[in-house]
Image: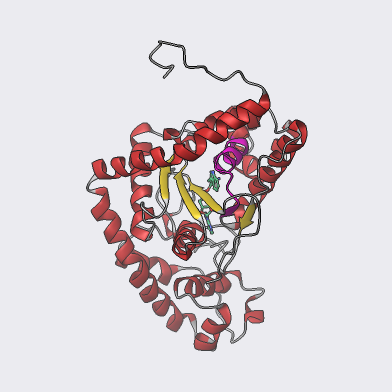
Amino acid sequence: MSKVVPTPSAFTPRVFSGIQPSGGLTLGNYLGAIKRFVEIQDQGAFETIYCMVDMHAITVWQNPADLIRNTRELCAGFIASGIDPEKSILINQSQVPEHAQLGWIFNCVARMGWMQRMTQFKDKAGKNAQNASLGLFGYPALMAADILIYHATHVPVGEDQKQHLELTRDIAAKFNHDYGVDFFPLTRPVIEGVATRVMSLRDGAKKMSKSDPSDASRINMTDTADTIAKKIRKARTDSDTLPSESGGLAARPEARNLINIYAALSDQTVEQVLYEVGGKPFAAFKPMLADLSVAKLGPIGAEMARLIADPAEIDRLLTRGSERARNITAPILRQTYDIVGMVPPVPVGSAPWSG
Ligand code: TYM
């Protein structure tokens, strides 16, 4: 596991990242994001803030009962994977209103042309872009606000988020330039390791995703041991044996994906794994991968189930997280408003909301 080292800057070394509560957690989310979040938290070199981005989730339709359940389940997934709500700040986005408030400012900074280039919008809106929500189009400006409302310096994500993080830097730079300040940091994406793009088990050219219609294409964090083993047994492969060196994986996307997953789960490099399994047929490798997956994911799934059984405790943790978050976000929003030229409140009002 590579260590993320804070870059010298005027800003406090601070990590922010988020996940949408728009369905179950997949192995892609775990290896590409959550496992990295835990490692960075435990290194102790950064203040860490991790978020369930419920406001991003509703850019496409979410059934309200599912959204609330998925948000709590995601919170359980974070904690079961090793996020400690004392060491990290754990929040759901809608409880920290400064995200949306800064998001509005950034809607006025970001340019239409920038947003139109976002591949994720094109993928998600599909052929019927006219019928997509305005929120889906503006999604990356809110994402920039999520990050910059904390002056976060580093953002660990999977590869699919790279373009959004470039846009975040563009927004910060334009804001700083337009107002003649050096207020928002140019945040560094942290896209590292062997699992920045975990692929579908059914198609090595497609990303593993919670929205894939085929459940067999992904491993869900709540899958049972039997289901995990079955999905790996059925994973698409080719008919060759495994190579002994990584060059041998170049034109074999399915083999590369399974080896990458094995390497990430066992904290090894691809070379170390191939040294161990090179020359083996898939019939011998798949049971090894299934056993490793069950050994690593089984305890997380079991702990998630235990935590989900007490939703009131999850809600308390999130409320506490949002209070801690707002100690950071409220002053940064106020300073932003001052830079932009918005009249601040003065303590004279008697209305209930003026305190
Ligand atoms: P989301 O919810 O799609 O995914 C959450 C995280 O999981 C990573 N990920 C993967 N990594 C490797 N392989 C995969 N197959 C895979 N699938 C998902 C994603 O790269 C991501 O890191 N826009 C974000 C949420 C967001 C956010 C933010 C992230 C909102 N605001 C601010 C960082 C900072 C998203 O939709 O992630």
Residue 119: where, in percent of width, then height? Answer: 67, 45
Between 178 and 83, the one nearer to me in the picture: 178
Above or below: residue 204 compared with residue 63: below
Q: Is-magenta flag for residue 149? A: yes
Between 10 and 287, the one nearer to me in the picture: 10
* In the displayed structure image, the side of residue 190 where residue 78 appears, left or right: left
Q: Is-magenta flag for residue 108? A: no
Residue 349: where, in percent of width, then height? Answer: 45, 11
Which segment is the magenta one? 139-156
Q: Which image quadrant is residue 183 in?
A: top right
Between 292 and 348, the one nearer to me in the picture: 348
Q: Residue at x 40, y 10 (%)?
A: 350
Q: Residue at x 37, y 69 (%)?
A: 296
Between 189 and 211, the one nearer to me in the picture: 189
Q: Residue furthest front?
A: 347
Q: Is residue 130 visible?
A: no
Q: Which image quadrant is residue 239 in?
A: bottom right
Q: Is residue 29 visible?
A: yes
Residue 137: where, in percent of width, then height? Answer: 62, 33
Q: Residue at x 40, y 55 (%)?
A: 87
Above or below: residue 130 compared with residue 114: above
Residue 25: where, in percent of width, then height? Answer: 41, 53
Image quarter where the C terminus lies is top left
Colour scheme of the picture: secondary structure
Above or below: residue 199 compared with residue 324: below
